[in-house]
Image (spheres, helix red, strand yellow):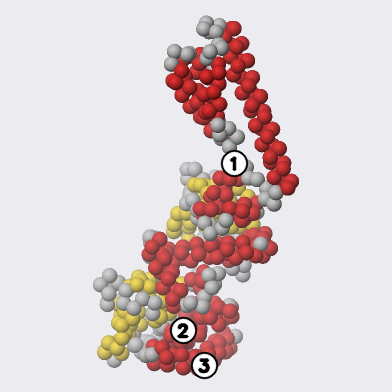
Amino acid sequence: MIAIYFLGGENPPLTRAAAASASLLWMRSTRSLFAPAGAFATLAVDESLPRLPAVRDWQWVAEGVQLILIPAICGSLFLFASQSAAVWLRTTFAWQEPLSLQDTWLVGELRNAFPSLPKRELSKLLKQADEVFYEPRSILTEQGSSNKYLWLVISGKLLVEVSGQVASTLERKAIVGEVTFLDPRDKLATATVYAAAPNGARTLRWRQEKLRAFCEYENSLGEKLMAAISEELIEKMVRGRGAGRRSPEESLKLLIQLRRAFPQLGTAEVPRFLKVAENICYPQGSLLTTQGEKNEFLWLLLSGSLSVIVDSQMVAQLSEGALIGEATFLGFAEEGRATATVRSDDSEGVQTLRWSQESLRELLNEDIALREKLVPAMSEELLRRLSGKMTEAQRWKGKSDCLTHDWCMEKSSGSA
């Protein structure tokens, strides 16, 4: 009516365009109900122009109400009634309840975070969550305190603080609380996480205990969800441990190296293994071990190359995926002393994952399943390197298992 009142019938195309544009803009928030709003507006203009009086007075307004407003109101009520009936039918007879516009948007956010999950399963996951907004400086987790929740950031930013220092920033699609969710035995938060100023952060929040029960009940969905959360945590650990942030391509490369070295590890076990690791870069000329000196670490070479020197003679070159320090870790070296000097000769330095042998032994003594996968892999790698041939390593596999058993018994009794 406003478009016809101001533009009249002198230029019908312009009047139609104005009416259609205004209708689409007005119906934007409810476009699921009024998809053909522009077409209805154009039809109303065409039907009303020939019938409205030429003089714009009270009679013109009365005719406009009868020709435009009353049909629009009746049509709107009909559409609302139709949608309500459709919702009732789907709710009563359909296997899955329909989603509101807000829930549809939230499912889209879940899909961005978990692209491997289909929409139907994401809808189930959404029903287990609460949408929670955190004001600036509001704390989600506190380092060293018990954590009962898992969060997904859907807007805003979170700051991660470790030992009083801001370590990183989490934005949309980031997951918080995944360490304690994946490992129920470790209930203490590893960092303090709080909403950043000035806008705070909006999240989806799940109670961990309830979500674990849900994953057990929905077995297929639970496995996919646990795998997706593990992948996110693995990438975050590999990417952010002591060497700054990397590109997704670099993170993927590091993750591939880790899996090549320990192919027996399941996706859910890798985060626990990485939890006690550090990401260390060694510049050219740095020594990882010195022959005859006590070694307290285990390394996985992620990038670059290392020289192995015995009695001042270079005897081997180590490339990506190699383990360093496994002889002292397994107890094959006398008094834990390094049997060779390992030096970084790469001009760009080398990137490694480094474990404290003491911390790793404590972890493996606590987690028998993880120990049974890691120790044989290290034993076989050492035997392969000593023999120099994979076939001989396969021949020694039985001996490797015995050595693994002896190591387990020795370390267990030693820790006891």
Q: Amino acid at mark 2?
A: Met
Q: Point out the image quarter for the N terminus.
A: top right
Could you classify mark 2 by the number of other residues whose Cα lies within 10 Å: few (under 14), some (14-19), or many (20 or more)? many
Q: Quadrant of the C terminus?
A: bottom right
Q: Amino acid at mark 1?
A: Leu
**Picture quadrant of residue 372:** bottom right
Residue 15 appears in the picture as rendered? yes
Q: Is residue 329 visible?
A: no
Rendered residue at 64%/23% (across/down):
73
Q: Earlier in the sequence, mark 3 or mark 2?
A: 2
293 or 106, which lies in front?
Answer: 106
* Kind of element beneath mark 2: helix
The residue carrying mark 1 is 101
Q: Identify the amino acid type marked 3.
A: Gly
Cα distance between the residues tagged 3 and 1: 61 Å
Cα–Cα gap, marks 2 and 1: 53 Å
* Residue for point 46% across, 74% down: 259
Q: Relative to 362, is 64 above or below?
A: above
Q: Tell me: 242 left or right of 61.
A: left
Residue at 29% of width from left, 88% of height from top? Answer: 315
The secondary structure type at the circle numbered 1 is: helix
Q: Measured from the top left, where is residue 109 in percent x and y?
A: 53, 50
Label 3 residue SS: helix
* Left or right for 147, reference 352: right
